[in-house]
Amino acid sequence: MAIDYNKIASPCYVIDEERFRRNLALIKNVSDKSGAEIILAFKGFAMWGVFDILKEYVSGAAASSVSEARLCFEEIGSPAHTYSPVYYDKEFSSILKYSSHITFNSLNQYNKFSKKVDRYSKKISVGLRINPEYSEISHGLYNPCSP
């Protein structure tokens, strides 16, 4: 069924569910055939109103805060792959609750929190972000080589 965009109030966001599902099916096919786990990046798409559809096709999401990790856990139904430049002591127990993977930004951060991860009641994998000292990205926010 074609959408008559002239009948839709503006401004608004419109998702064509058929096209959305067709694109998601391509992603799911890649995941199934390759064995790769495909996760959503909230920075790229955070329209939680369609997460009921989205969660049929992806296995989780990348979160950069305790709020995003909770969003993934509650709305997608999966623990998050969590990375944050800063983890706060007061939030870290929630990060543990809502995450299956936690990536640390420095050895200091790893040393500060890794024992809490090890003692947690469920298995959480940990990673360490490495600065490759080379990037073709000019925008600092997304540059993996930022100081």
Image (tube, rainbow, N blue to C red):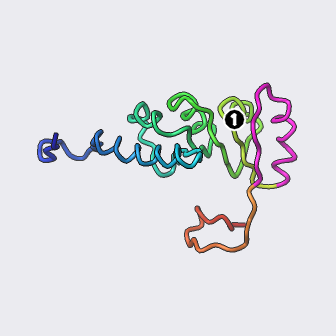
The magenta-colored residue range is 107-128
Q: Residue furthest top?
A: 121
- Residue 108 drawn in magenta: yes
Decide which of 17, 119 is in the foreground and name it.
17
Instruction: Name the residue rendered at 40%, 34% in the picture.
Output: 53
Element marked by disc 1:
helix
Placement of the C terminus among the 4 image quadrants: bottom right
Residue 146 image offset from top left, x and y in percent: 68, 67
Instruction: Name the residue rendered at 68%, 74% in the picture.
Output: 134
- Residue 100 drawn in magenta: no
Answer left or right for 94 relative to 17.
Answer: right
39, above or below 92, in the image: below
Q: Read off the residue under disc 1.
A: 95
Decide which of 52, 74 is in the foreground and name it.
52
Residue 109 image offset from top left, x and y in percent: 81, 49
Q: Which quadrant of the view contains residue 24?
A: top left
Instruction: Name the residue rendered at 64%, 42% in the picture.
Output: 81
Tag 1: Cα neighbours inside 10 Å, few (<14), some, or many (≥20)? many
Placement of the N terminus among the 4 image quadrants: top left
Residue 55 image offset from top left, x and y in percent: 47, 34
Q: Which quadrant of the view contains residue 79?
A: top right
Q: Residue furthest front?
A: 33
Instruction: Name the residue rendered at 66%, 43% in the picture.
Output: 82
Q: Amino acid at mark 1?
A: Ile
Q: Which quadrant of the view contains residue 60?
A: top right
Answer left or right for 89 relative to 48.
Answer: right
Residue 88 image offset from top left, x and y in percent: 74, 41
**Count the marks: how many?**
1
